[in-house]
Amino acid sequence: MAKYERELRGSFDQALEYFHNGILEGSMSASFEEESYVQYAGVRCCVRVYERYSWSGGNRLSMTFTLVGDGDNLFLSAITAGGSQGLLFKINTWGEEAFLDTLRKLAERYPG
């Protein structure tokens, strides 16, 4: 499992579209699986799950992407899981890290 978190500024809707498109374009096997969205007192939260095939692990892995927005203050959290090998211990987590690196690079270039 790997995790990445970052505070950003900008439009919630534009950020959500930017990251969604970037994740899907970042891997030819990436897919959008499902989402949950809620808004309370102006605070917005969207949780999305993406999957992709891990060539190094020979299986699929997932990334849970969460974006929270309060005005133009944004908080991004992403956690990857699956894709590792091993019965008792996790080995070969390269696929998880690589999937998360796609998001990390997008966050570093985020124009917000």
Image (tube, rainbow, N blue to C red):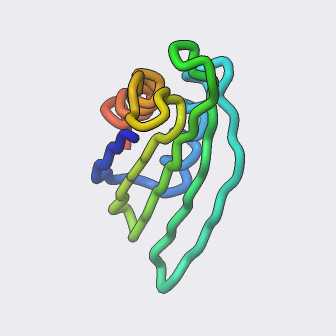
Say which of 6 and 91 sits in front.
Answer: 91
Relative image position of residue 46 (x, y in whole percent): 55, 61
- Count of number-bearing discs: 0
Residue furthest bottom in the image: 41
Question: Relative to 9, is 18 on the left or the right?
Answer: right
Against 65, residue 22 (above or below) is: above
Location of the C terminus (image quadrant)? top left
Q: Residue at the location (68% across, 22% down)?
A: 29
Location of the N terminus (image quadrant)? top left
Question: Relative to 46, is 111 on the left or the right?
Answer: left
Q: Residue at the location (51% across, 14% down)?
A: 56
Say which of 7 and 100 sits in front.
Answer: 100
Q: Residue at the location (55% across, 22% down)?
A: 26
Question: Relative to 45, is 109 on the left or the right?
Answer: left
Say which of 2 and 31 sits in front.
Answer: 2
Relative image position of residue 55 (x, y in whole percent): 57, 14
Q: Residue at the location (40% across, 33% down)?
A: 90
Residue furthest top in the image: 55
Relative image position of residue 70 (x, y in whole percent): 39, 70
Against 55, residue 100 (above or below) is: below
Query: Can I make out residue 106 in this image?
Result: no
Against 29, residue 9 (above or below) is: below
Image quadrant of residue 93?
Answer: top left
Say which of 81 and 36 sits in front.
Answer: 81
Against 41, residue 80 (above or below) is: above
Image quadrant of residue 109?
Answer: top left
Query: Can I make out residue 69 in this image?
Result: yes
